[in-house]
Amino acid sequence: MIQEILNNLQLLQINNDSGYQCFKTGCHFYGLDSEKNVVFITSSQNKQSTSIQQTKQLVLTKNIDCKLKVGDRLETGRFDVLTCLSQNQEHIKAFIELTNLFVKNETSLTITDYFICLKDLFTNKHKISSKELQGIYAELYIMHYMYQHGVDLFSLWQSIDKMKFDFSVSEIKKIEVKSTKGENRIHKFRHEQLVTDIFDVYIISVLLRKDDQGLSLFDLANLIKNECSHNLKVFAHVENLLLNYSIEDLKTIKFNKLYTDKNIAIYKAGDVPRFKTRQPDGVSNTEYDSDLNNIKSRNIQEFINWINNK
């Protein structure tokens, strides 16, 4: 669908008037303005007032009179127009992917919500390390794996990087995902992830094995975006994490799927070897490696029941 939209945009002919050259997708329009910027156009959601929001890469103009040239037809009316000013092809693709969620999903979200997501997406981000990419792979894979078991972890994923836990089931229940490419199930933990008077924590441990014929981070991300297409926040967060990498880069990060499936283990935080006491006053951010090889893992159904009994 996304490639079809990109192909149709390339077929549009630009004229010099103030209108838009468009094609229709569902009840909405994609097209080009007179400056060859990609636009997404939808019927005005609020016909009482006109407004403009703009960043360096985006413009959202709401409730304006438009002339839309759709093939041989001319459509006029009041529309909301979201314009991608960036000529970066990855930005344009992300713009189409996110607006296409608006086309597919009949939700309470507004075009402004999508503008905000895209604004955050286009903000320059630094590339993360290969170790962090491995961690993202593991988190995405666990979301996919649990989705296959009828559990929606998408809405529980922490959308802010560097938070204490990867998933937040409730104010008290938390999930942390750990991964390693080593043969032994040894992971680094922050002491406060394992010893707490506040949180009820499950640890999901994932062993990964590199494989040129394995599931790539690129394909895994697309799987997730398809499975969570109802969730704009998660969809945008996946895009946000990976936008600074080329498709070729993401396709080189591959792990054997059968090995991953066989080597997922679930533990209660209290099962994990750790210092039993809390950090003393004046000490913080204590980290250490814990060996989980000789610990009996929990049954997945126990874990699913724990999630569902919020």
Image (tube, helix red, strand yellow):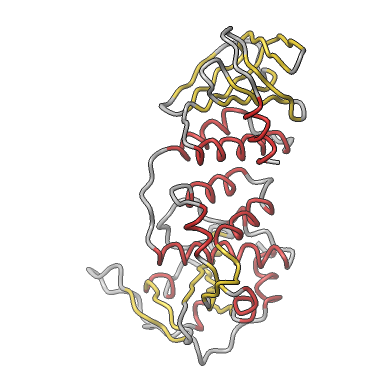
Residue sitting at x 39%, y 76%: 188
Q: Residue at x 47, y 58 (%)?
A: 249
Quadrant of res 302? bottom right
The residue located at (38%, 45%) in the rendering is 125
Q: Position of residue 216 (x, y in %)?
A: 57, 64
x and y, in percent, of residue 99 in the image: 63, 34
Quarter of image, res 211: bottom right
Instruction: Say which quadrant the C terminus sits in.
Output: bottom right
Looking at the rendering, in which quadrant would you find the N terminus?
top right
Q: Nearer the viewer, residue 187 or 60?
A: 60
Q: x, y (%) of residue 98?
A: 60, 38
Numbered marks: total: 0
73 shown above or below 266: above
- Say whether residue 143 is left or right of residue 28: left
Identify the residue shown where x is 45% and y is 62%: 133
Residue 185 in percent (x, y) is at: 48, 84
> Residue 227, relative to residue 53: is it above or below?
below
**Vertical comparison of 282 with 243: above or below:** below
| Above or below 142: residue 15 | above
Viewer-closest of 57 and 228: 57
Q: Nearer the viewer, residue 173 or 180?
A: 180
